[in-house]
Image (cartoon, grey):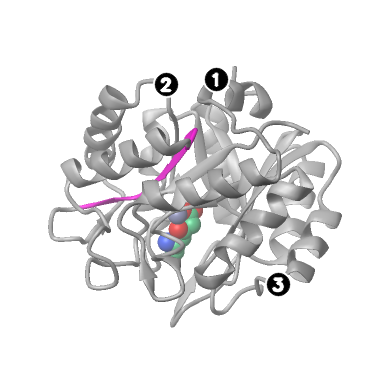
Amino acid sequence: MDKLIITAAICGAEVTKENNPAVPYTVDEIVREAKSAYDAGAAIIHLHVRYDDGTPTQSKERFKECVDAIKKVCPDVIMCLSTGGATGMTAEERLQPVELRPELASLDCGSCNFGGELFVNSEDMIVEFAKKMDEYGVTPEVELLDKGFLDTAMRLRRQGILKSPTHFYIGLNIPGAMGGTPRDLMFLVESLPKDCTWGVTGIGRAAFPMATMAILLGGHVRVGLEDNLYLAKGVLAKSNGELVEKVVRIAKELGREIATPAEARAILGLN
Ligand code: KMH
Ligand code: ZN
């Protein structure tokens, strides 16, 4: 089994300091959270950025400022920049970080309800995003929030718009999309093509059950304040690092080693 790649989704676009005071907004806070996750064992940082007042933005300049600052303290970490942004943003806004040529960028392969909002990714948008990532040499991390997202991704693979092997990220338990039970995860994992790598994040209380299943099944894990505000029932996480540390502890108990960023690059074919 490959070593375990841990991704930390440190910020997100929806959670706020009212939800958990550790949610980062400023560049310094984003760097602090990235470093805490990296020091704890995260090989990949899935990044959204905010203005100082917490407003989410897909500004290329703000992304560059944050990525450069993170790279100063976590020089070898793999950056996965979000093209999901926040609900309601235009495709043009959302695509900006691809121009920074990160190693990975998220590519959401379908539309769904997202809490009280709609998260819109029409097939035309998905194709446009995939083509832009290809043009800029960015590997897509194909985000699956529901089974239909996988069916779309597989159709785009057959059309040559997505490449194989493909790296998939499964996000479960978003209110409005697929649930986060072991059965939900097994159904998706068993539906994946053989030539792929995959990871999972469980939103909210599904976080550590999904992480544990991925550790056992040979998948990879994402945690972070974007997805989970709590370390345990009623206990807010003090940092992204604390969430990553918990995954590391579970993995160690189950005998799965943690991948360094260099090992993660080899596993994902990013070299
Ligand atoms: N903020 C969500 C609407 C992604 O990063 O690609 C979308 C999201 C997915 O977070
Ligand atoms: Zn995201």
Comparing 52 with 164, the one in front is: 52
The percent position of residue 61, horizontal first and vertical second, equals: 22, 37
- The crowding category of the residue bearing disc 3, from other C-alpha atoms within 10 Å (few below 14, some 14 to 19, many at least 20), is some
User: What's the residue at 40%, 35% (across, down)?
Assistant: 38
Marked residue nearer the N-terminal end (2 or 3): 2
Residue 181, numbered circle: 3
Residue 109 visible in the snapshot: no
Secondary structure mostly seen in magenta is strand
Q: Which image quarter: residue 123?
A: bottom right
Whole-Å distance between the Cαs marked 1 and 3?
Answer: 32 Å
Q: Residue furthest top?
A: 271
What residue range appears in magenta?
Answer: 42-50
Q: The residue tagged with tag 2: helix, strand or loop? A: loop
The type of residue carrying mark 3 is Thr
Q: The residue tagged with tag 3: helix, strand or loop? A: loop
Residue 262, numbered circle: 1
Marked residue nearer the N-terminal end (1 or 3): 3
